[in-house]
Amino acid sequence: MTPTFHLRAFSIMAVLALGTAAHAQSANAARLEKARTELQKRFDAADTNKDGKLTREEAQAKMPKVYKNFDAIDTGHSGAVSLADIETFVVSKKGSRKPAG
């Protein structure tokens, strides 16, 4: 086999790998956007007084996981959490998970 053949085969494999990685990244971005949209809908439904924050009682009624972790999410101890507070908490929890293996 010629060096040109090897180079062409390597190039094809690289393009396929990049395409697969780009597809996976696109799929992850789509899943992330779907999760954010769903979180926004659930937050809006729970925010009964429409002030952009959830009290412990609002969270208890419609967002039980937020209620369960309310003290950890409410890092400023204000008695209310915003959507940004919840997202920050979720990202920090995902970052603290150990990879499987």
Image: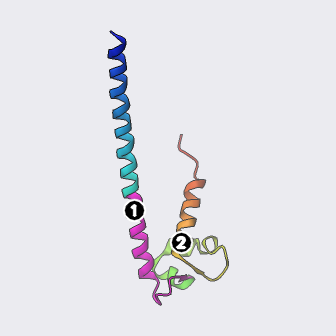
Residue 41: say if magenta.
yes
How many labels were placed on the picture? 2
The CA distance from mark 1 to mark 2 is 15 Å
Residue at which label 2 appears: 84
Is 78 located above or below residue 19 in the figure? below
What label does residue 33 carry, if any?
1
In the picture, the quarter occupied by the N terminus is top left
In the picture, the quarter occupied by the C terminus is top right
Q: Nearer the viewer, residue 15 or 34?
A: 15
Is 21 located above or below residue 86 in the figure? above
Q: Residue at x 50, y 74 (%)?
A: 64
Q: Quadrant of residue 76?
A: bottom right
Q: Earlier in the sequence, mark 1 or mark 2?
A: 1
Q: Which residues are magenta?
A: 31-55
Residue 83: say if magenta.
no
Image-based side of 74 in relation to 42, left or right: right
Q: Residue at x 33, y 22 (%)?
A: 9
Is 20 located above or below residue 72 in the figure? above
Majority secondary structure in the magenta region: helix
Please rate how many residues cluster around mark 2, counting C-alpha atoms within 10 Å: few if below 14, some from 14 to 19, many from 20: few
